[in-house]
Image (spheres, rainbow, N blue to C red):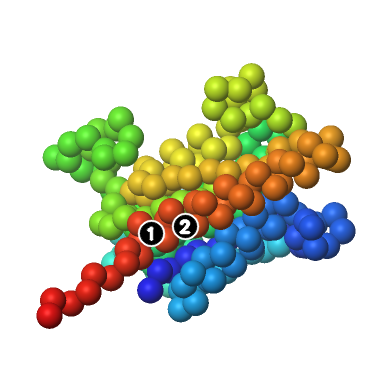
Amino acid sequence: MTRLLHLDASPRPGRAGTQSHGSHTRRLTHHFVSRWHALEPDAEIVYRDIGTAPPQLTSVAWIEAAFTPAEQRTESMQAVLAESDALVDEVERADILVLGVPLYNFGPPAAFKAWIDNIVRLGRTVDFDLQYGSHPHLPLEYYVPLLADRARHAVLLSSRGGYDFDPGRPLAALNHLEPSVRTALQFIGIGGFHDIAVEHQEEGGEVLAASVDSALARIDRLVERLHATLRPASKPLPA
């Protein structure tokens, strides 16, 4: 059974194509999860909406608690970290993270950055050891990604007001969303990373519709490819 963590970071409550002024990223994540469920009805899907219920921001109390050894934490420290622990637990259990994150001002919304800051945790998702060699996903020394124990994938589904933000395109250097998310997740051991985006949101019209159609088609292909990778066809038993 595959476990999916479905996360939406847009503050828009509805889905584009269904509700007026709905979110394109919510439409994309819903499409991905629906397609996966059609292929694997028994898949476990955990949903979290950080667009309407953002995680807590890091604070002095949070930092003090996070960097105190677990066995020495007071009840108040444990309470401060309770939400972060729950978020980390969801990521640990997931085989695929389905992340709906719009591009705001060249980067992610604040709610999504707060989620990243809550799940990148020393001792929970990453560690530091001077006896450890190079990081398996990033050119770093001494960092131990604790979620590299098995294959996990992240699928970042985004929307952009403008266009030409993809790698190799004229505005790629201004896109700080996909690179930052890839770096943070690979830092903790999530080695598979896939991204699909809708562009031309501000223009609208035919160019937006074409971009949406292209994104949905690419999601369909990605679902089939990932499903084949994570759920290979069972081999017949020998006679």
- Residue 196 vs 238, above or below: the answer is above
- Residue at 63% x, 36% y is 107
Q: Quadrant of the N terminus?
A: bottom left
Q: Are marks 1 and 2 in contact (CB under 8 Å)?
A: yes
Q: Residues within 10 Å of mark 2 (few under 14, many from 20)?
A: few
In the picture, measured across the screen, residue 189 lies left or right of residue 194, that is left
Of 13 and 73, nearer the camera is: 13
Residue at 37% over, 43% down: 187
Q: Residues within 10 Å of mark 1 (few under 14, many from 20)?
A: few
> Which residue is located at x 28 percent, y 57 percent?
150
Tell me which residue sits at (43%, 53%) in the image.
Answer: 225
Q: Position of residue 22 (x, y in %)?
A: 80, 57
Is 216 located above or below residue 210 in the figure? below
Residue to which mark 1 is pinned: 228
Could you tell me how far apart the alpha carbons at marks 1 and 2 are, in whole angstroms? 6 Å
Q: Indicate the quadrant where residue 131 lies.
A: top left
Out of 78 and 207, give the one closest to the viewer.
Answer: 207
Please provide percent x and percent y for residue 98: 53, 57
Q: In which quadrant of the rendered image does the C terminus lie? A: bottom left
| Residue 173 can be seen in this image | yes
Q: Quadrant of residue 20?
A: bottom right
Residue 122 in view (yes/no): no
Along the viewing direction, whichever of 203 and 12 lies nearer the viewer: 203
Q: Toward which corner of the image does residue 220 lie, by quadrant?
A: bottom right
Q: Secondary structure at mark 1?
A: helix
Query: As shown in the figure, which amino acid type bears the numbered disc 2?
Result: Glu
Residue bearing the label numbered 2: 224
The circle drawn on residue 35 is none
Q: Position of residue 100 (x, y in %)?
A: 61, 53
Amino acid under label 1? Ala
User: Is 183 left, or right, of 218 in this rendering?
Assistant: left
